[in-house]
Amino acid sequence: DGGITQSPKYLFRKEGQNVTLSCEQNLNHDAMYWYRQDPGQGLRLIYYSQIVNDFQKGDIAEGYSVSREKKESFPLTVTSAQKNPTAFYLCASRPGQRGKQYFGPGTRLTVT
Amino acid sequence: EDKVVQSPLSLVVHEGDTVTLNCSYEVTNFRSLLWYKQEKKAPTFLFMLTSSGIEKKSGRLSSILDKKELFSILNITATQTGDSAVYLCAVEMEYGNKLVFGAGTILRVKS
């Protein structure tokens, strides 16, 4: 069945380590997004990609990196430069440049 | 700076009550306003509003947009415990291909 998958559901890392969060979609959507959600702050955009091999910084890109080598996949790397990486990370996609976004189930990252 | 503000931040009601959630915005080049429900994981889409004064309805939920006063409301009638969730409001701009989200309203419906 179609949708967006994110893995893993929970991730624990030590401070100073890079970690990569997976996001895959089989909806044939062109655009993909990464958001971070913290309590009381709603969703904040990290990076987005409108087409393969192209991506743009969002509002809080510092300490993160992405790639878009395939239409279906948009992995997010949380680097050691991200000062406060513990959060809930949501991936989303949408067919074109307008309208609603479809969200994956999220990955909860805890860094200690 | 583009801004979306939701109120109240949290709300506790009893089953059967009617609730109204608010979303106000200050953005450049408004295109649409979207409401999502988040029950622990993925936000699920409720409504997209582009025109003022036209109510969108789905069962016990309804929403309306006022582009002159820059706000939207989400109404839930005859609330049920299954309505307990975080309700997110987001605004899409004409340019930039992104959504700006409010902080959300946490709704808890007690039986």
Image (tube, coloured by chain):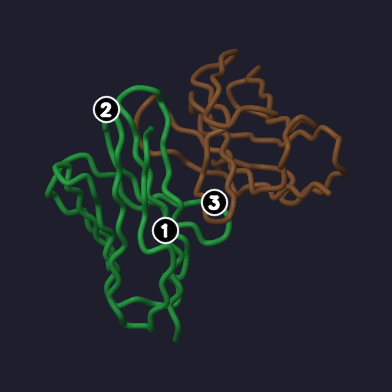
Q: Which residue sits at x=87%, y=44%?
A: A14
The residue under label 2 is B29
The residue under label 3 is B42
Q: Amino acid at mark 2?
A: Asn
Q: Secondary structure at mark 1?
A: strand
**Mark before the other along the chain sequence, 3 or 1:** 3
Q: Nearer the viewer, mark 3 or mark 2?
A: 2
Q: Which residue sits at x=40%, y=49%?
A: B45
Q: Which chain contains the residue that carries disc 1?
A: B
Residue B76 position, x and y percent, is 29, 68
Residue A1 position, x and y percent, is 56, 44
Which shade of the palette goes to chain A?
A: brown
* Residue B19 drawn above or below residue A95: below
In this view, the residue farthest toward the bottom is: B111
Q: Which residue sits at x=31%, y=53%?
A: B23
Look at the numbered discs 1 and 2 and tell me whether their residues touch, using CB distance below 8 Å: no
The residue under label 1 is B87
Name the quarter where the N terminus of chain B is drawn.
top left
Q: Nearer the viewer, mark 1 or mark 2?
A: 2
Q: Which mark is residue B31?
A: none
* Residue A53 drawn above or below residue B81: above
Q: Which residue sits at x=54%, y=41%?
A: A2
Residue B74 position, x and y percent, is 28, 59
Q: Secondary structure at mark 3?
A: loop
